[in-house]
Amino acid sequence: MANSLMTLAIDCGGLSIKASVLDSAGTMHSQPIAIPTPYPLSPAKMVETVMEIAAQLPKADRITIGFPGMIRHGVVIHTPHYINPKGPRTKSDTELMAAWKGFDLQSAVASAMKVPALVLNDAEVHGAGVISGSGLEVVLTLGTGLGYALFDGGKLAPHIELSHAPIRRSTSYDTWIGEHERRRLGDAFWSRRVRDMVADLRPVFHWDRLYLGGGNSNRLKPSTLKVLGDDVVIVPNAAGIIGGVRAWEF
């Protein structure tokens, strides 16, 4: 595909940042690379990190970034991890909070890299790589926290931070289902929580399909997978990169 448009797809997580370059068909043209998320992570450091990653990969014509938190039109409204100088679940910093709030990451990356850029919530990019494009499709990513995206007939719905919805009175889905709790509980008990979450949310959405992805989706126990239902599909974490091409269609 000599004339294929090449996309640098970057999947930003709380613990690591992964990237690869893909052609228009979604075929990777390099082995994915991953680096630990550098903390403290200011907006300027984020742009610098994107440039450093790009320098290690084949040249791309455009960039897609899947970013954790609330993103509107490429602007960061809120990010749950990068406001914490020492990483996820640590104390937040007021200066970092102020720096990230309202930061136009999409424009900043496009300006620094001199190519078009697209910044979406990371679960939205993940979903772009897996949805069928028909019916109401919900994407939940299981990682450092909980990611969420909603598609109707292949169209991306406005983003809400479902992960911040309260669960069991004293906590949020993001904490209740996130990596910290998985480590504390072990995979078996944590898998039961995922099962309960799916059962709780099914009557809220009445989805046609639910996709469970993210780095921890492969930790779900077989006993849980058996009872999730035929409307639930487990998808690989690589979708967070592969979706970087199709995300431009939304």
Image (cartoon, rainbow, N blue to C red):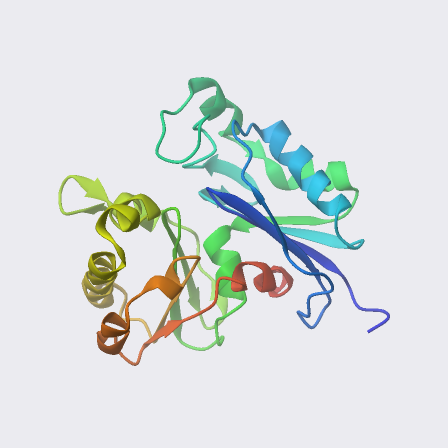
Q: Nearer the viewer, residue 142 or 205?
A: 142
Name the residue rendered at 25%, 46% in the picture. Answer: 184
Residue 156 appears left or right of 61: left
Q: Nearer the viewer, residue 59 or 75?
A: 59
Residue 65 shows in the view: no
Query: Which residue is at a point 73% across and 67% down the rendered structure image?
Result: 23
Residue at position x 68%, y 48% in the image: 117
Q: Eyeballing the image, is 208 above or below 67?
A: below
Q: Nearer the viewer, residue 70 or 152?
A: 70
- Above or below: residue 129 compared with residue 37: below
Q: Position of residue 164 (x, y in %)?
A: 30, 43
Residue located farthest toward the right when viewing the structure as drawn: 2
Assign the N terminus to one quadrant of the image.
bottom right
Q: Position of residue 229 (x, y in %)?
A: 26, 78
Q: Is residue 72 left or right of residue 188?
A: right
Q: Where does residue 44 sit, x and y in percent of width and height? A: 63, 28
How many marks overall?
0
